[in-house]
Image (tube, rainbow, N blue to C red):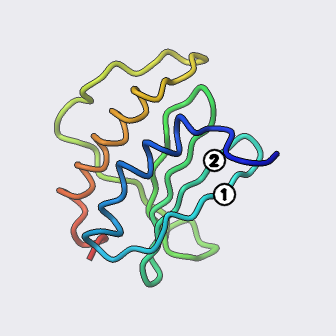
Amino acid sequence: MSGDPFPHFSAPCKRSFAFLAERYGFAGPEEEQIGRERYIRYSKDKKFISIAYEPYGPPVIEFFTPSLDIKNRTFPKRPSQPLPMKIPKRHQEWTEQQIEQFLQFWASQIEANEKAFLS
């Protein structure tokens, strides 16, 4: 498969997480396609932020440091406010607008609540 099969995910993801490179010195984005999943990753020193997308599901954001041990993988803290959008039902494709709203919400939550990981 050549090219990006999920531009409706990749473009809003890169827009939403550009702040990682612009304000916190992360490298990236690096993109990878593995099977049905698209990964966009940002890295700084030995810290990674990975945003993954598979059709019909929400994007998954995780923080990790390279290790075989699962304990070095975490997820952003649960937000104190509700999502500003309705999540599509299972087996319903997400639109670019829904993905962008979801990722912009999480990007703002990460910037506000994950300062230790970002620094």
Look at mark 2 in the image and give the residue it sits on: 38
Report the residue at 44% width, 52% height from top. 14
* Mark 2 neighbour density, 10 Å: few (under 14) some (14–19) many (20 or more): many
For the residue marked with disc 2, what is the amino acid? Arg
Q: Residue furthest bottom?
A: 45
Q: Quadrant of the N terminus?
A: top right
Spatial separation of the CA atoms under disc 2 and disc 1: 6 Å
In the picture provided, is 31 more to the left or to the right than 50? right
Whole-percent x and y of residue 4? 67, 45
In the picture provided, is 32 more to the left or to the right than 16? right
* Labels 2 and 1: the sequence-earlier one: 1
Q: Quadrant of the C terminus?
A: bottom left
Look at mark 1 in the image and give the residue it sits on: 32
Picture layout, residue 86 above or below residue 47: above
In the image, 20 versus 61, the foreground residue is 20
> Cβ–Cβ below 8 Å for labels 2 and 1?
yes
In the picture provided, is 24 more to the left or to the right than 100? left
Rendered image: mark on residue 7: none
Report the residue at 74% width, 51% height from top. 34
Picture layout, residue 13 above or below residue 17: above
In the image, 73 versus 31, the foreground residue is 31
Whole-percent x and y of residue 114? 25, 62
Report the residue at 59% width, 72% height from top. 69
* Mark 1 neighbour density, 10 Å: few (under 14) some (14–19) many (20 or more): few
